[in-house]
Image (tube, grey):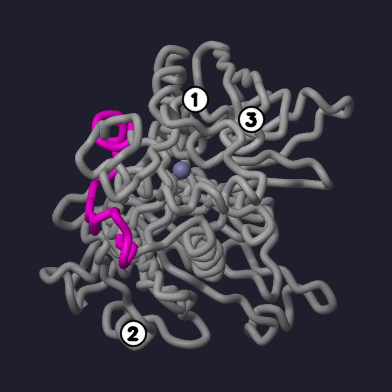
């Protein structure tokens, strides 16, 4: 699935009071070019420092409890989660957020005003694609009786169980597939809340200076004080608002099923860090490189590959097939080591992988794609032509080739396939390959 990057069409503004600082603040949203991400700019500081909304800029949650705070070189922005939640759910990938204070405005305590402002500003789609992460293995984190789990899933689903034992708030559960419409109708309007018994403590910590009964649901044993719920289960829906806000710090779209059980910012952000770590290891997700797109998808180890194509050492140039969609697309991996036979002579003292062998590696991945079909098993794929070959980057020992082949045309005996080879997220070589399938 290919997803285009988005920003807003027109400049938009909003003013309000920070929920914790109680300070008045003005925020201006401006369109930003592709691959910018969400950038906060503190316009009240003479040097106008920039803080990118990403997990590496997260401030210590122990030090700044009950909110998500970002910081960079001594400059801080607090309570970003409701704004980031709305941006993430509306799929706004690139945006400049100018702010003349240290805390985002709390508005009505939910994310709905941010949704309305962004929709009014209009959404602009770029040609550039957005990287989407597909989780491949479950992740599970537990801490002090709270849990967060992320499972492979082909969309973004969030499920949450709210449960405070011995409290006036009864257990609640909600689960949604997150898309812009569902978010706007079912989630965005859910307001922040606290228990009446927590109010004293929060005030003594200097928090909630901008909170009142209208923007914060205060829950006592008799129900919500001086207010009414917008949804019967408004608190659990707000926990989902917060979780999406924290997820935005990933800086990438993700498809998975996240299950939170009593989790808050601390556990949520630990999950984001873990997802980042796991997906970084899967080098396949380098910027600009192909991302794995099908769950579940078939993979082939070297033993499987040797059953499909006849190539052997020293001429087998693919180590693993990490994804194969029959008749459509395959992604293969080749780890290039200094021990490759061709480095002995190409060139002594300056090892560079021959470009024609990168083309051969693409042809082998394409061969696996064509011959893995049941009716083609045991046959051979012969090269008929190579076209539009371009070498864009030298390949050296230690590089990992990520080889993506896509079918352009496929008839019973002839296939036209486009191949691209990436190293560190950049295209190293590309070519258009034509094959014919013959009996062995
Ligand atoms: Zn919140």
Residue at 49% of width from left, 25% of height from top?
A: 107
* SS at mark 3 in the image: loop
Please say whether residue 165 is one of the residues in the magenta stretch: yes
Q: Marks 2/1: CA distance?
A: 61 Å
Q: Quadrant of residue 346?
A: bottom right
In the foreground, 294 or 122 = 122
In the foreground, 161 or 427 = 161
The numbered dot on residue 107 is 1
Circles 1 and 3: CB atoms closer than 8 Å: no
**Which quadrant: the N terminus?**
top left
Region of the chain picked out in magenta, as a range: 163-189
Please say whether residue 388 is one of the residues in the magenta stretch: no
Where is residue 207 drawn, in percent x and y? Answer: 62, 44
Residue at 51% of width from left, 56% of height from top?
A: 265
Residue at 72% of width from left, 69% of height from top?
A: 352
**Given this view, does label 2 or label 1 mark the residue nearer the observer?**
1
Is 290 left or right of 182, judged from the image as shown?
right
| Circle nearer the N terminus (2, 3) | 3
Mark 3 Cα-neighbour bin, 10 Å: few <14, some 14–19, many ≥20: some
| Circle nearer the N terminus (2, 1) | 1
The numbered dot on residue 22 is 3
Q: Is residue 234 above or below residue 133?
A: above
Q: Quadrant of residue 413?
A: bottom left
Residue named by callout 2 = 306
């Amino acid at each position: 699935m290919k997803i285009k990057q988005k920003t807003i069409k027109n400049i938009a503004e909003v003013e309000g009071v920070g929920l914790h600082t109680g300070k008045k603040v003005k925020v201006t949203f401006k369109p930003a070019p592709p691959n910018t991400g969400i950038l906060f700019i503190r316009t009240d500081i003479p040097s106008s420092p920039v803080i990118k909304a990403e997990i590496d800029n997260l401030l210590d949650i122990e030090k700044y409890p009950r909110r998500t705070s970002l910081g960079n070189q001594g400059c801080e922005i607090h309570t970003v989660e409701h704004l980031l939640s709305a941006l993430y759910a509306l799929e706004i990938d690139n945006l400049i957020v100018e702010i003349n204070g240290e805390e985002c405005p709390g508005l009505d305590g939910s994310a709905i005003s941010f949704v309305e402002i962004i929709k009014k500003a209009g959404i602009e789609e770029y040609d550039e694609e957005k990287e989407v992460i597909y989780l491949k293995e479950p992740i599970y984190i537990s801490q002090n009786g709270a849990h967060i789990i992320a499972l492979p899933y082909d969309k973004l689903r969030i499920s949450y169980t709210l449960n405070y034992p011995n409290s006036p708030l009864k257990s609640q559960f909600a689960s949604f597939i997150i898309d812009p419409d569902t978010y706007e109708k079912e989630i965005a309007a859910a307001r922040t809340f606290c228990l009446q018994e927590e109010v004293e403590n929060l005030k003594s910590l200097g928090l909630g200076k901008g909170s009142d009964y209208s923007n914060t649901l205060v829950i006592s044993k008799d129900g919500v004080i001086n207010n009414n719920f917008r949804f019967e289960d408004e608190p659990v829906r707000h926990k989902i608002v917060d979780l999406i806000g924290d997820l935005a710090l990933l800086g990438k779209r993700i498809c998975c099923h996240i299950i939170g059980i009593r989790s808050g910012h601390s556990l949520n952000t630990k999950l984001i860090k873990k997802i980042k770590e796991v997906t970084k290891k899967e080098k396949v997700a380098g910027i600009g490189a192909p991302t794995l797109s099908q769950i579940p998808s078939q993979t082939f180890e070297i033993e499987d590959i040797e059953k499909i194509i006849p190539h052997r050492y020293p001429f087998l140039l693919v180590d693993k097939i990490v994804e194969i969609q029959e008749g459509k697309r395959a992604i293969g991996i080749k780890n290039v080591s200094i021990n490759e036979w061709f480095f002995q002579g190409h060139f002594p003292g300056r090892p560079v992988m021959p470009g024609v062998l990168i083309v051969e590696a693409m042809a082998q991945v394409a061969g696996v794609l064509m011959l893995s079909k049941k009716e083609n098993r045991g046959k051979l794929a012969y090269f008929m032509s190579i076209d539009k070959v371009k070498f864009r980057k030298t390949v050296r020992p230690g590089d990992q080739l990520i080889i993506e082949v896509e079918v352009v045309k496929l008839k019973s005996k002839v296939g036209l396939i486009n191949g691209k080879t990436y190293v560190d997220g950049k295209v190293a070589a590309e070519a258009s390959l034509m094959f014919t399938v013959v009996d062995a």
